[in-house]
Amino acid sequence: MQLADSTLAIDDGPLADRLTSDAIDREIAELGRLVALTNATIGRRVDTAAADATLRSLVRDDQLAQRLNLGAIIGTLAQQAAQWLYDLVGRPDPNVLLNAQAVVGILVAVAIVALLVRGTRERIRNETTLGVVAGEHRVDPTVHLRAADDAVRSGRARDAIHSLYLYAFATLAAREILRYDPALTDHELLRRAAQLPRADSLRDLVQLHERVWFGLRDASAPDVARARTLATEAIG
């Protein structure tokens, strides 16, 4: 079995031994059930957006808790200082004590607000930087097209079809026609592209890519030519 990045050897001898004339229908049905189960397992994807949102929420709650703890520590230190002054000079004027408590409270509030504002600015700066970096690493569609040409010259038809497949999706993403996410399955991508004017060409390209990339059939030069035609039609 040809995987995306390696080859998996499977011994089908035991299955062949079980395929007798009496049991062939039952065994083929069982094999179909296992194939469907495998496809369903491969098709599952982690919801990266939900995981990222949960992680950000946990980090934000932890940072807020740390800031509140800092405010409580400052308040305790202020109370200790007031108690020390009280023991040192005796009972102060109540008005002076009230004014001192008000000043300390204001200082604590200002310190907490400053920490919150600084944390918010830092988070905004980090998220903006991440967004810029992600945009800077977007692959130019022509890179995939050149890779396909190199694969054709080297006689690697399978790699050429894979590069043309990536070229089509990268071009649609660059034109902001379709949001391409490598974490999605081919069927999920096709559902996103169902409303495109040339969705049929994109679907045929995906099906051709699946057959040759996952080893269901050998790739040939006519397959590469058809993949190039379908990719050109899909991007308009």
Image (cartoon, helix red, strand yellow):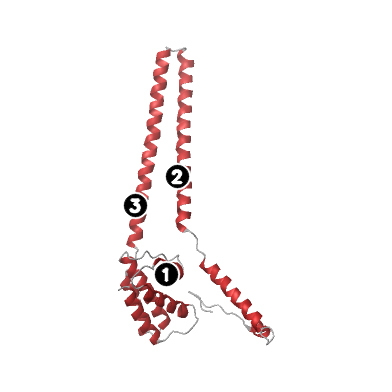
Residue wearing tag 2: 60
Calculate the distance from the C-alpha at mark 1 to the C-alpha at mark 2: 36 Å
Q: Quadrant of residue 114?
A: top left
Residue displayed at 39% across by 42% down: 119
Q: In which quarter of the image is residue 12?
A: bottom right
Q: Where is residue 39 in the image (x, y as percent from the top left)?
A: 54, 71
The amino acid beneath tag 3 is Thr
The amino acid beneath tag 2 is Arg
Disc 1, SS: helix
Residue 128 disc label: 3
| Vertical arrangement, residue 213 with respect to residue 170, above or below | below
Q: In which quarter of the image is the C terminus?
A: bottom left
Residues 15 and 2: in front is 15
| Among the two numbered marks 1 and 2 on one chain, the one whose residue lies closer to the N terminus | 2
Residues 86 and 17: in front is 17
Residue wearing tag 1: 190
Q: Position of residue 214 (x, y in %)?
A: 49, 77
Residues 169 and 3: in front is 169
Q: Where is residue 140 in the image (x, y as percent from the top left)?
A: 32, 69
